[in-house]
Each structure stands twice: as structure tokens, then as C-alpha cells.
Amino acid sequence: AQSVTQPDIHITVSEGASLELRCNYSYGATPYLFWYVQSPGQGLQLLLKYFSGDTLVQGIKGFEAEFKRSQSSFNLRKPSVHWSDAAEYFCAVGARGGSEKLVFGKGTKLTVNP
Amino acid sequence: NAGVTQTPKFQVLKTGQSMTLQCAQDMNHNSMYWYRQDPGMGLRLIYYSASEGTTDKGEVPNGYNVSRLNKREFSLRLESAAPSQTSVYFCASSPGTGATNYGYTFGSGTRLTVV
């Protein structure tokens, strides 16, 4: 069964600084990988996803993520953080074939200082 | 353009009471899911329905039942609510056709408190 680890529970950055949120997964083959964002009191919104091909994927709101098979990682990055990026971010992994159920990490809460 | 609609948005129950959380999607998706979100625990899968007419247990199914009423609707029932079921519940749907369509659309959640 697949699993996801987000090592950082809480990250604080200054507005305009760069951001990297870490995600490590466990799965026997190449998985489907996702990043979701949740603003306070809201549902989850898809930022980006990786299925195959180019290992650097672009998403909405200026985010990107890179799939590194050798490190079992799918880290999320943004060159310059805006105050509106403050939210909780979830990495998720899905298995190829069969059910489309996703396994989510425990999340990383991002605080942005002015 | 509603996507996934959950009702109610908020609910307070007394221990032992029952209730049903409703979820409907208008995207003609085959697969639907119920998750619960607790602080520091992320989202955990309760039940899912890969297609109309099928349901399967997820990671934390105890104390819950589900019904896939038709292709659009997937309800979650708490027969005898317990304080441990205080949580935020999310319904999600996905196309269920594999490959590049793979991915969830989430509802806005139901915040349930059991006292």
C-alpha cells in the first residue's frame, strides 16, 4: 500500500521569499502524485499533478513540483511567496490501476510573514 | 457549475444520535469518496465507491455506513454518534476513467461536533 510523508508540520516564510514544501512517498511503482491546498475553513483545491513524462510539472498560482524517482520525492516549490499563499498544503499519492483512491500526507501549514 | 455539494455544512449531535451526511456531484463522475480530516492527521479515507453500485471500506470505516444512491449521490451515515467522530468530513469525486483524468474534486466539507 502507498503512503506519504510530509516532514514539515509548519513552515514560516517571509513574503517574497522562495518556498519548498517536502513530500516523500512510498509505493512499489511510479505513482500518481498530487498537491492540494486548503485555505482556512475551505475545501481542498488541486494545485498540480504528475502522471508521467516531464518530471517538472507546473500548476496554478505559480507553483511547480518536481518528481524525483531516485529520492521518492515530489517537492512543491514557488519562487516568490505571496501573503495569500498562507494555507495548508497536502501531498497525495495514488496507485496506478484499480481504484482511484488517494492517500494523503498529514499536511504542512504555511505561514507568510509580511 | 456546482461540482460537489455537501449538506449540511455544520452539525452538532448528542452522543448516540444518528445522522446522514449528503453528497452530490454533477460532473458525471464514476467514483466518490468520504474522508475525515482531524488536526495533525491529514485526510483519512472512510469509504469509497469506485462506481455506481459498489462501495468499499477505506482506512477508518468503523462506526460509519455508506450508500451510493445513484451515480450522483453518495451518503455517509453515523448510526450512533460518538465524540471520537467529531471531525470535518469531506466528500470527493473523480472521473474513475483512469490516467490523465485521475484526480479529485472536493466538496466544501461538513463540520460535525458530537457532544
Image (cartoon, rainbow, N blue to C red):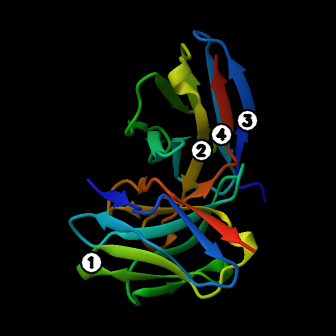
Mark 1 neighbour density, 10 Å: few (under 14) some (14–19) many (20 or more) = few
Is disc 1 in contact with disc 2, using a CB cutoff of under 8 Å? no
Across and down, in percent, residue B20 comes to 63, 24
The residue to which callout 4 is attached is: B23
Residues at discs 1 and 3 both on one chain: no
Q: Nearer the viewer, mark 1 or mark 3?
A: 1
Kindly identify which chain the residue marked by label 1 belongs to.
A
Residue type of the residue flagged with mark 3: Thr
* Observer-nearest of B49 and A6: A6
Residue type of the residue flagged with mark 2: Cys
Marker disc for residue B7: 3
Label 4 to label 3, Cα distance in Å?
Answer: 7 Å
- Of the numbered discs 2 and 3, the one sitting upstream in the chain is 3
Mark 2 neighbour density, 10 Å: few (under 14) some (14–19) many (20 or more) = many
Secondary element at tag 4: strand
Secondary element at tag 3: strand
Give the left or right position of residue B82, taking residue B28 as reference: left
Residue type of the residue flagged with mark 4: Cys
The residue to which callout 1 is attached is: A71
Label 1 to label 4, Cα distance in Å?
Answer: 38 Å
- In the image as oriented, which residue stretches furthest toward the right? B1
Is disc 4 in contact with disc 3, using a CB cutoff of under 8 Å? no
Is disc 4 in contact with disc 2, using a CB cutoff of under 8 Å? yes
Marker disc for residue B91: 2
Q: Total marks drawn? A: 4
